Image: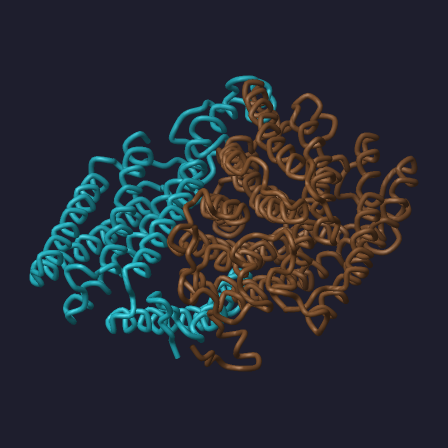
Chain colours: A cyan, B brown
Amino acid sequence: MSQAQGGYYLPGPSHWPIIGSIGLAFLLGGFAHFLHGESDIYMFIGAAIMMIMFFGWFGTVIRESQSGKFNDQVDMSFRMSMVWFIFSEVMFFAAFFGALFYARELSIPWLGGAGNNAMTNELLWKGFEATWPSNGPKHVGGAFKTVDAWGIPAWNTLILLTSGLTVTWAHWGLKKNNRSQLILGLFLTVALGATFVGLQIHEYGHAYEHLNLKLTSGIYGTTFFMLTGFHGLHVTIGAIMLLVMLIRSMKGHFTAKHHFAFEAAAWYWHFVDVVWLGLFIFVYWLA
Amino acid sequence: MSDHHPTGIMRWIKTTNHKDIGTLYLWFAFIMFLIGGSFAMVIRAELLKPGMQIVDPLFFNSMTTMHGLIMVFGAVMPAMTGLANWLIPMMIGAPDMALPRMNNWSFWILPFAAVMLVSTLFMEGGGPAFGWTFYAPLSTTFAPKSTDFFIFAIHMLGLSSIMGAINIIATILNMRAPGMTLMKMPMFVWTWLITAFLLIAVMPVLAGAVTMMLTDRNFGTNFFNAAGGGDPILFQHVFWFFGHPEVYIMILPAFGVVSMIIPTFSRKPLFGYASMVYATAAIAFLSFIVWAHHMFTVGMPVAGELYFMYATVMIAVPTAVKVFNWTATMWRGSLTFETPMLWAIAFVFLFTIGGFTGVMLGVGPADFQYQDTYFVVAHFHYVLVTGAVFAIIAAFYYWVPKWTGHMYNEKLGKTHFWLSAISVNVLFFPQHFLGLAGMPRRIPDYALQFADWNFVSSIGGFVFGASQVFFLFIVIKTIRGGEKATDQVWEGAEGLEWTIPSPAPYHTFETAPEIK
């Protein structure tokens, strides 16, 4: 069904995209349906269809790659696309970091009467003093404490930075055809990623039970959980990517010269690493 | 190479061919244009006379909201992406788009997102009625349940745009024929390269904005809730950080189209090609640092007002470079006025009117008077209808002989042009007067002193709407038959797409052409 034209591989007609569209519509439409107190079945049907699509689509690409269909120019298309995809993810996080900085530097001080907002404070929010962390003039969610940056978050920083080293070590192994180094490096990276997510879940439990810090705890709780939550989601996605690379490595996929998928997963991993450093500094440390 | 692809409906559903996908995008955009246009007809019918005649106020507000969303995300953006799909590989001598399967997915998300978006009109509590800018708290605390479906429709549209843009960048940077350096690329390709960058930079920010809406609505977050330390104005900042580049996403490819058409019918190369490239890049850069000029009246610090005013008015410089270059291209050219050229010239005139009113609105103190009036409505319809939409129609007449192998009927094309060009001014020019006199946007009824110009505007609207149904007839007639087009089609046309047969074969440039 496929043609290689002028050396550049052009895939033939495919049913995976339309399956993906149907799955996405079920997943998101079903989620909205569920949010309105209705059945959650459509959401799960959508998730299942998406899983089938991802397995089928990526499986097809892996088979094409293994049969040597991708020349250097195709490889370059993949590389460019991954770089721009990661850039789009950076901009997604930028929106939430922007919300955090806006709240800290502008909206909270203004509610407290800074700049030309004396009457805002006097008439609307009398007695509110601008501090950070804050859950706003109405103390939405009640009094809370923040997570200590030098407890679990510091350990998590060490874990993610170490995982950045282990994935690079795995890459060195791949480049000098040392399979066991590749597999061990990837295994350690996935294990460190899983540890990070586990500790993060533990920290969330601690925040909810002992610190009264919740998603609903004013703007602090909102930005804290949305930023760390989306980051945790991305760590999970990155760990799944690396797990797939681990399985493929054990199956003997990749060569010292031809291993774009591995590098894409590694780039993504470094991206979540860098986002974490931003979170550690601006969400935990300077809280 | 044989074309073994499925036939019938499955050809279109499973296709990975850039020409098929371009056709799908263009038809989708046209259908959405007619649906969004019919909503505009409801708006103009209600505003024909003062008083409440046809629809209730909530439904009226749903109509303005849906009209805007459908025209932006359903009509103009997909039409531009359709042109990109058809033309970019042919213009740079590539066998197809860089990632053909993902290209299919970029398109086939759209119909599902569109159905989800339009279906909100039929849900309990009505569709979204907070305007296409969906400001909080109108879209959070006070919005109907259907808003959650709207949010996910926006997520899907954004996903489609990001994948489409990634594909376009990879195609342009990686698939050019040997010898086609960046500064030899046709202007349309340049404008799309920069547009794709804008899309990747801002669509995720829009996703962030609607995600904040979703969690504020359903999970008790406080992004836009002042009592919890958030701020409804934060929504406007996030939205317009996306929204201002978004308007350039819609107009930059239009600049590209016009920069292709005017040289052809002037029989001269584009004047100041390099300055066109730099002006496009400058406009794109400025688009990121001017967003709060949409928010002059929200109570920003004066320093902010001044900064955003100066930065905004600066956009006039690179834009004027473009207008002067188009004019200089025509200067002493051997001009002919076939239908595409008429639309392109109308674009230059009428877009410039929209540009001028943009400068007026960019002046902070004056904007306090114009804010949220029909003057703003007139402004952005001049840039988007007589700007983006006119360029898309010009592109259709210019390239349809290459797509179908048939010439359109010149007499019908010119009739379509004059009907549209006159009626669109009858429709939108009086709205400047209404706005200056103080008529607010997004209202189903108005004070009596606005009656005359509203009547005129509505009549113009009905004629303009009917003209686009006439356009549908021309499109179908041209696809079904017509005078056989030559390979070069236009005497003065230059570029790789005019070196291949008309209609363009299913696969082109399987071997890369030589660029001298």
Quadrant of the image for the N terminus of chain B?
bottom left
In the displayed structure, does residue B17 sit left or right of residue A158? Answer: right
Number of marks drawn: 0
In the displayed structure, does residue B457 sit left or right of residue A143? Answer: right
Q: Position of residue B51 (x, y in %)?
A: 90, 46
Q: Position of residue B318 (x, y in %)?
A: 57, 31
In the image, is residue A150 above or below residue A21?
Answer: above
From where the camera sits, is residue A182 visible?
Answer: yes
In the image, is residue A161 above or below residue B107?
Answer: above
Q: Position of residue A219 (x, y in %)?
A: 45, 37
In the displayed structure, does residue B157 sit left or right of residue A176? Answer: right
| In front of the other: B505 or B215 | B505
In the image, is residue A186 above or below residue B248?
Answer: below
Q: Residue at x 72, y 37 (%)?
A: B379
| In front of the other: B137 or B117 | B117
Q: Position of residue A198 (x, y in %)?
A: 23, 54
* Quadrant of residue A250 within the rendered picture: bottom left
Q: Residue at x 16, y 63 (%)?
A: A255
* Quadrant of residue A142 within the rendered picture: top left
From where the camera sits, is residue A37 visible?
Answer: no
